Image: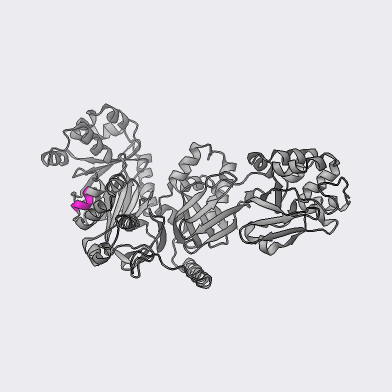
Amino acid sequence: MNSILSISLLLLLLSVCSAQPLVEVLRQNSATTLLQLAKTDSQLFKSLSTFKGTVFAPTNDAFSAALKDGDRFTQDSTTDRVLKYHLVPDTMFAGDAAFEGAEFLVSLNGSDVKVSRSENGIVVSSAWNAPQANVVKMFAFTGGVVHFIDQTLTPPLGIVEVAKAAGLTSLVSAVVQAGLARTIINLKDATVFAPSNEAIAQISSLVNTLSKEQLAQVLLLHVVPNQRLHSTDFATSALLTSSTEARVQVQKDAQGVAVSGPGNDVAARVVTADVLASVGIVMHVVDKVLLPAGMLGGMEPASEPSADVTAMKGTLRVGKLAAAVEGEGGASLIAVLKANKATTLLSLVQSDKPILNALADFKGTLFAPTDKALAASVATGFNPKNLTLLSTVLKYHAIPTTVFAEKSFTGIQFLKSLEGDEVKASGSSAKGITITSAFNANTANVVSSMAFSGGIVHFIDATLTPPTDIVTVAKQAKLTALLNAIMSAGLVDTIVNLKTATVFAPSDQAFAAISATAAKLSKEQLKQVLLMHVVPGKLVHSTEAAEAKNLPSVGTAASGQMISVQSDGKTVLVKGGGNMNPSKVIVADVVVMGPLVVHVIDQVLLPGNLSAGAGSIAVGLNVAFWMGLFFL
């Protein structure tokens, strides 16, 4: 709400005032030192004429004080880095009376700037222990707003230098001992929970028993890659994926922020939040070391719980999540997306009013692609300006009436999206949750999760691709013989218009094995063979095959024959009445538009009155009835 008020006031100022270009505003306000320094970089100075966003402009006195304090602007590279840190592109921040709390803005040099309100007005914070700058006046310009400040901002140093400056000597020593110095120095866009010296001292006896690799495992558990999470971003509860792929639990309560690893009995507390480092690193100092599973009693892995215990834990966790979701005071979906800086997704949602309205009352699970995920999908061909496509893609990421809790989930689930087609979710205790969409599309990993008032948001590192029709998928999977058979039988329109069905799709090798028989079939006979591979009105996934046993297909329903299905939990076997041996599913659970589920098999299914050596087949009139009932 405060950000909205701030932007509204700024837009009002811009509309009623005859705003001038940025360089002219700086001249009129006697920002001569800033202009002189900017001119030392011709490219930077030229860019000021078209810059859009927020400028934190130090006064001449502020620059004079900074020049006396170490002469920090004598090198071109330093000047460029410092000046770019004072520019926040594409963000119009107006420090009006409505603003309170804190906001973190990404500067042109990539590092964060913290803006907050004090008793004296708006203050801007930069590097660790650098003086805070006070906003002394504000002016709109044609591309945004300038805040004149009484101190120069100091760009954050690298995380190792910041840790040293903060006195985290035990952590720095541990990083060096684990051989992680280069890894940590090269970190970008990450959140780090940094144990204090006292925290490491608490487990000194355990640390002394760890090998170099084990120590590295402990330290990397404290790093959440690809996310800048500030204290303002933490909701009531969240699960984050660390660099080791183990999950870190973060919970915000009246006492502050608590953090725990899989092996912690007692959560760590954040004692110093939002320490900024370069580039895009947010560090939170914690009072306990986060531990991997099974670490409390040494490094041996924890024993595997029984199936009953696992099921009970899953039930309890989902129940707890449901209680949190249904409880009063939960953040709205839009608020959770804003808090997690899902700016691209929000922008796309806001460009589609029906979707925006739907999300206002949405209850269920949302798979929210990160900004990087959406940027990658645009780079590979996704056009968000195509509103029909955009609506389809956005709806495919929303799972209505389903609260899908991810930490305890293992195995496979198929979830029906708001778009109508299915999303496949796979979970393991080692790798977490992966989401599969269209055939050959990138698999998305769940990188963090947060509850909102109507369900849960899972942030994912790849955009989900809605499934295409079955003929397109067959082409992509190179099922050439199947496609040729469908065309020969005149079934293209029938197959394309399938709704809610399971399809067993024979491979090219499967068709080759019955080529002699297939050559003798009439068009109607070929049609019945192909339709025998379609189970109408039912989605049978590999996870349900064991319970399926016998299924009526379109081709067998007229004669009362059934398709036999068997599964031992690993292999699925399918058999028609005319098959001597069962066919094996070689590619399972291909999600297709319809919704359909397709399984590629290594033999063609045959009716009971047709074997690989026979040439006759009875075609009943009821086939037309089944086709009309299930496909039209």
Q: What is the span of residues highlighted in magenta in the rendered image?
A: 161-165
Camera sees residue 125 = no
Tell how many labels. Answer: 0
**Quarter-of-image position of residue 26:** top left
In the image, taking residue 29 as reference, residue 407 lies left or right, namely right
Quadrant housing the N terminus: bottom left
- Residue found at the far left of this picture: 68
The stretch drawn in magenta includes residue 84 = no
| Above or below, comparing residue 19 to residue 327 in the picture | above
Position of residue 178 measured from the top left corner of the image (x, y, whole percent): 28, 53
| Observer-nearest of 236 and 557 | 557
In the image, taking residue 424 as reference, residue 584 lies left or right, namely right
Camera sees residue 419 = yes
In the image, taking residue 585 as reference, residue 168 lies left or right, namely left
Q: Residue at x 76, y 45 (%)?
A: 494
Q: Residue at x 76, y 41 (%)?
A: 486
